[in-house]
Amino acid sequence: MAAKRLAEAAALVLILRLVYKRLQDSEARRVQRFHKRFGPPKHGCFVVTGASSGIGLALATELSQTYGYDIIVIARREPLLSRLASELPTNVIPLACDLQTAFRDEAGVLDFRKRLEGALPAGKALAGCLHMAGNSDLAVHGLTDKTAARNLEMLDLNCRATLGVLQAVVPLLAHHVMRTDYRAVAVTPGALTAFVPSAPTFATSAANKNYIRALTLSLRYEYESDGIDFVCACPVAVRSEILDNADGGSGIERLVYIPTGLEWAQGVLADLSLGLPETNGRYMDYMTAWMTFGWGWTTRYFFQGRVQSNSVLLNRPVRLEPLREKLAGVYRQATPRPED
Ligand SMILES: NC(=O)c1ccc[n+]([C@@H]2O[C@H](COP(=O)([O-])OP(=O)(O)OC[C@H]3O[C@@H](n4cnc5c(N)ncnc54)[C@H](OP(=O)(O)O)[C@@H]3O)[C@@H](O)[C@H]2O)c1
């Protein structure tokens, strides 16, 4: 009897706690928490890279519309950035830049920092950098199915540019902390592949995103006491043009809800205000837990299977035959085997 009463009391406490937490998580509370951590819009502004489309665009929109910040938006397609500037309610400063080639050497980092400093609205410091520009190729079977140039370009955008952007912004974020006594934040573009040591058929993505996540989490501890949060944002899957019909699958795939960019961005910003080290935008957290703690053969099997479903989804056929057959055209003349 006593045990039953205890169990009922525990269940009640749990339910009340859940309700309390839910009430605390209203949009108004999220905004209040965010402003309390990173300072109100009158003190600081944000920079968002990859803001011309996808999740960068969603984060920029949410920061302006809901959180009221001025933002500097970066991508290559200037017309899209200008259109965004004309649509959002706060001061939006477009800064067209190719991040893949911007950081060839130290001068590139210094130049990028100077451009950012020059773009800051008068009287405001840089409270945060949401670096979202990047890519992870879908539906490519093997390393050699992509051109070497494509793999090298991915490395430059995902790894080199992430390092370059962080090197450029840290002093600006530190200035915001010194000036206002609020914290600052730097967010980097991870992915589900950042959680596994090996993801066959997603080799370049896994290697690039592991680099980004390790860099970000290491910097987090280097700069925690200096008032700068480093956060790795790791979308599992976010709805975009190419992923629009991805949750129309069968069986277990029906259980997967793919959020819109806006839904995902709302979850990310709510997590930033809580000071978390990484965020999946509050969608499909179980997937990252599986990648981290699951059996290696199951996660490898997932990626190998994924490449085939992505190929159907994107209507981009993948070649699944062994390398020997793929190279048959290249080495047309059978070369004699060396003597034993
Ligand atoms: N969506 C997902 O489901 C998902 C899942 C896992 C990881 N991610 C990661 O999230 C990030 C953004 O993904 P997304 O889905 O939003 O992709 P997206 O819609 O293709 O957006 C990519 C953004 O990066 C910008 N960009 C690309 N190359 C650039 C360059 N050289 N210089 C400057 N900006 C550049 C693009 O703008 P311009 O073309 O105008 O330059 C665009 O704004 C990527 O790092 C991706 O790997 C996304």
Image (cartoon, grey):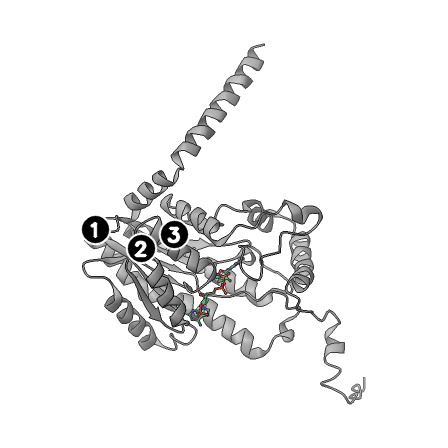
Identify the residue under disc 2: 89
Q: Which residue is mark 1?
A: 180
Q: Nearer the viewer, mark 3 or mark 2?
A: 2
Check disc 3: other Cα within 10 Å, few if <14, some if 14-19, many if 20+: some
- Assign a secondary structure to mark 1: helix
Q: Earlier in the sequence, mark 2 or mark 1?
A: 2
Quadrant location, the N terminus:
top right
Q: Nearer the viewer, residue 19 or 37?
A: 19
Q: Are marks 3 and 1 in contact (CB under 8 Å)?
A: no
Q: Is mark 1 within 8 Å of ligand 1?
A: no
Q: Amino acid at mark 3?
A: Glu
In the picture, residue 173 is in which quadrant?
bottom left
* Residue 209, x across and y down, in percent: 51, 61
Residue 33 left/right relative to 4? left
**From this viewpoint, is residue 229 visible?**
no
Q: Label 3 vs label 2: CA separation?
A: 11 Å
In the rendering, at what x and y percent does residue 259 appear? 53, 50
Residue 62 shows which numbered tag?
Answer: 3
In three-dimensional space, the C-alpha distance between marks 3 and 1, rounded to whole angstroms, equals 23 Å
Task: Residue type at mark 1: give it.
Answer: Thr
Residue type highlighted by circle 2: Pro
Which sits earlier in the primary sequence, circle 3 or circle 1?
A: 3
Could you tell whether 329 is left or right of 201 in the image?
right
Quarter holding the C terminus is bottom right
SS label for mark 2: loop
